[in-house]
Image (cartoon, rainbow, N blue to C red):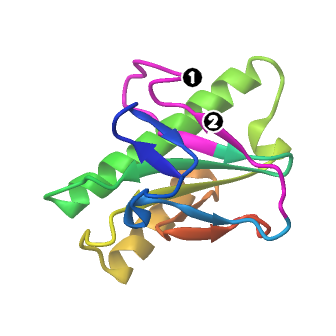
Amino acid sequence: MVDDEETKCSRFGKEGDDVGKALMVINEKKREIVLLSIDNKLLKGIQGGIADCALFDDKQFRFVEFKTNAEGNAQKNFDKATSQLKNTIQVFRDRLQAVDVMFDDAVVLSCHIVLSHNFPRSMATTQNYQYEFATDTGGIMLSFDSETYWEKPER
C-alpha cells in the first residue's frame, strides 16, 4: 500500500512503486481487505489533520499515516503523525457512536506510521511513542514496521 503523491490519496501498490515508501501487507489466507482512502477522499479539512487511509475487514481496522517524505526533525514528524492518528480515531469513534456503533468493540483497532527506510529513528524513540500512544488511546497498538501480517490482528 502506498500514498500516491500524484493523486494525493492512498492506494494498493503496483509494480514500479517504491517499496521503501510502502506498507507491505502479507495476507497469507487471502482475506478480503478493503482500503479506505480517508485524507482528501472520505474526509477533507479536518482540523488537526487525519490519517491517510485505513485497511479493514470484518475483524480488524488499521489506520495508516504515511510520512515517507518526512524530513528534518524526527520528533516533530512523529508528534504530527501520532496526533493525526489519534484525531482520526476520535473522529471515527464520535461519528460511529452517533449511530450507536461502538467502534472499539466492533473490530480490533491498530495504527501504522510508515516512514521512509532512510528516515532516522531509534528503537527507544519508537517504543516511547508506542507506549504513549497506547496509553492515550485506550490500548491501541502503534506500529512503525514497514510490513505487517494481516492474519494476526495487532492488539
Q: Residues within 10 Å of mark 1 (few under 14, many from 20)?
A: few
- Residue at position x 26%, y 72% in the image: 118
Q: What residue sits right under mark 2 in the picture?
A: 36
Residue 150: quadrant of the picture: bottom right
Say above or below: 52 vs 109.
above
- Report the span colored magenta: 30-54
- Type of residue at label 1? Leu
Answer left or right for 41 relative to 84: right
Q: Are marks 2 and 1 in contact (CB under 8 Å)?
A: yes
Identify the disc placed on residue 142.
none
- Type of residue at label 2? Leu
- Residue at position x 13%, y 58% in the image: 72
Q: Mark 2: which secondary structure?
A: strand
- Residue at position x 52%, y 21% in the image: 43
In this view of the protein, which residue sits in the foreground, 154 or 137? 154
Q: Mark 1: which secondary structure?
A: loop
- Residue at position x 45%, y 19% in the image: 44
Say above or below: 93 vs 1.
above
The answer to if 139 sits in the magenta stretch is no
Query: First in sequence: mark 2 or mark 1?
Result: 2
The answer to if 52 sits in the magenta stretch is yes
Q: Spot the residue most to the front.
A: 15
Q: Residues within 10 Å of mark 2 (few under 14, many from 20)?
A: some
Q: Position of residue 34 (x, y in %)?
A: 73, 42
Q: What residue sits right under mark 1 in the picture?
A: 42
Q: CA distance from mark 2 to mark 1?
A: 8 Å
If the image is split into quadrants, where does the C terminus sit? bottom right
Q: Position of residue 105 (x, y in %)?
A: 83, 45
